[in-house]
Amino acid sequence: MTDFRLRGFSRLQAAAQDPIGYARSWKARTGRPVIGSFPMNFPSELVHATGALPLIVQESRTPITEGRSLLPEFYCSYTRSVADQAAVGELDVFDAFVLADHCVQLLGAADVIRWAKPETPMHFAQFISSMDDPWSGAQVRDKVDALRVEVEEIVGVTVTPEVLGASIRLFNSNRRLLREFYDRRKSGALRISAGELQVLVKSSMVMDIEEHTSILNDMLDGLDVDSAAPASLVRLHLSGHFCAPPRVELLDLIEECGVLVVNDDLYHGTRYISTDVPETGDPFDALATWYLDRNVSAPCGTRVQRNVDWDSYLVASLEDSRADGVITLMAKFCEPLMLYYPELRRVLDDRGIPVLLIETEHEGLAAESVRTRVETFVERISRKKVAA
Ligand code: SF4
């Protein structure tokens, strides 16, 4: 077997574990600006087309100190961590920040950055959250133009359709490669843990996209088919967790309980890589199309669309991956997920699909309690499978 871990995985892991360190060294190496963007809807291609590094600001693992008093305790861990990183100077490497909104709490974090770093440009594009109104497409297209103007001003470079088209093709090919890892895992051709897959996706949010793509190509090159996973393992879908990745220790713990994770809809997972930007026509129109399309590919609890919903998407995805159940990972105080979860739960319950909710927090992991709950859940599914 050709082990993909021998082919550049450690470089992806280093960037995923220390995005700010990666940004500092990239900046020192290239002399070009680093632009911070925020999950979950910003089109990184636009920043890339200026020659700057687009980097999605990540939740830091360090305990929240200064930031504790800057946002209410009932804000999610991602927003409080971003506020903390701004307050303690961790975000100083960024030359500007850009975001396309999706959630009220994220706006609070943006306000803290404005307060902590008043000299650093911050642009906020309010992408419409109602996706299928008659005016939605035109409004999003206008916002893409506003973003383009701001990004051009920040970097001092004009974004031409040709250069943006090239950036779009680069990001599309990166997403395609990442989906290849997902497809191979789903088909059983590749044994890769959920934590390792997270490293692949998270590092793509941080690294120079060409460097990342080259490593992915190398990792896939000549990869042999793995031996099939034991049929006794319970097949699970991981759902939820917007903006920040669940802890790798939590993913490992889940898999240690006799589980094979076969798919997910996590932001640091399928959600992020679900949708390509159209490569024909005007590339600025294409970015607006991408924004509207991705809520169809992977519906999100922060968007409103009458003709798609997360629960139908989830049920179809479970059938496709032959998952036996769902573990929903919910970041504490993530309002969009808290509000949507009862609907998801009702639909899964109605179909007899087992579901377990695990709430996550910034500080620590109640490992033994979570292990007990996952083991009980897995046991319940195993008994159900035997009885079927
Ligand atoms: S969507 Fe959830 S995790 Fe993301 S900023 Fe909003 S509350 Fe936080």
Image (tube, rainbow, N blue to C red):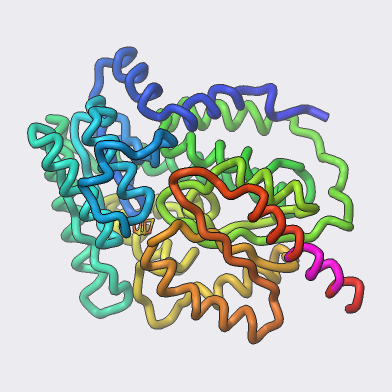
Horizontal and vertical percent for residue 368? 67, 50
Residue lying furthest bottom:
350
Q: Quadrant of the N terminus?
A: top right
Magenta region, main secondary structure: helix
Residue at horizontal 12 percent and vertical 45 percent from the top: 149
Badge count: 0
- Ligand 1 location (quadrant): bottom left
Residue 206, picture quadrant: top left
The answer to whether residue 261 shows anywhere in this view is yes
Horizontal and vertical percent for residue 298? 49, 64
Residue at horizontal 63 percent and vertical 26 percent from the top: 218
The answer to whether residue 51 shows anywhere in this view is no
Residue 295, picture quadrant: bottom left
Residue 270, picture quadrant: bottom right
Between residue 360 and residue 348, name the one nearer to us: 360
Horizontal and vertical percent for residue 305? 37, 77
Q: Is residue 63 left or right of residue 326?
A: left
Q: Quadrant of the C terminus?
A: bottom right
Q: Is residue 287 left or right of residue 92?
A: right
Q: Is residue 23 left or right of residue 87?
A: right
Horizontal and vertical percent for residue 366? 58, 49
Residue bounds of the magenta highlight: 377-383
